[in-house]
Amino acid sequence: MEKMKSAYEIAMEKAAKIEASEEFDKKGELKPLLAKFFRDKINAEDLWQKLKDNYSSDQYKQAQIMLINSLGLRTTDEQFKKRKEGILAIEALKDEKNSSLLEQYMNNISTLINQYEQEKEKMEEQIKQRLKQNSQARMKPIQTEDGRTVMKLESGVDNETREQFNNMLAQFEERYSMKFDQYISELKRSL
């Protein structure tokens, strides 16, 4: 009677498959192909054609992971569209296809990137306006090297205000980065 595998054993098998696909890439066969794709020397259809007969399912997954890892919050619409096409083209090569789920996750990521850009532009504009309103040039006395006291014009924006803006931007970036990382993890799990 065949023994049922534990969750640990299944996880170890998956890890071994991923390691094997990483070993494959260490030979340097996928990176040059994807580099051509990133440099627009080949399109998604060409990528599909080159991968079709020469690679295994694990290698398809590794190529998809490499494409996913190239995504970021600052990915342009054009770059995102190209990577999405590549990921979906490779998915079409697999025995077990999950294209609709991948497309759904990719659309969620695209929406998040667009929201990030729009909100970032608004926030930057608000900060500029507030800085403009709060910045009043002031004359402050300073001591020169030769001991004289002269008046110097300084910005009225204090360090506390700058620190508040920096914290606001950092929190904004962190919030979107966490959501982006969550979507990327979900996308990778669906491969």
Image: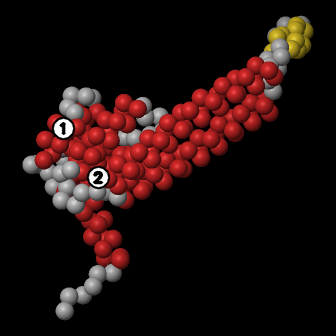
Using the image, determine if residue 162 lies above or below residue 177.
above
Residue 131 in view? yes
Q: CA distance from mark 2 to mark 1?
A: 16 Å
Give how far across and how far down residue 129 sits, in percent: 73, 22
Identify the residue at image location x=59%, y=41%.
173
**Residue with the mark numbered 2:** 99
- Along the line of sight, which residue is nearer the eye, 2 or 155? 2
Q: Amino acid at mark 1?
A: Glu
Q: Which picture quadrant has residue 23?
A: bottom left
- Along the line of sight, which residue is nearer the eye, 21 or 89? 89
Q: Is there a contact, CB below 8 Å, between mark 2 and mark 1?
A: no
The earlier-in-sequence mark between 2 and 1 is 1
Quarter containing the N terminus: bottom left
Quarter containing the C terminus: bottom left
Looking at the image, residue 98 sits to the left or right of residue 136; the answer is left
Looking at the image, residue 78 sits to the left or right of residue 86; the answer is right
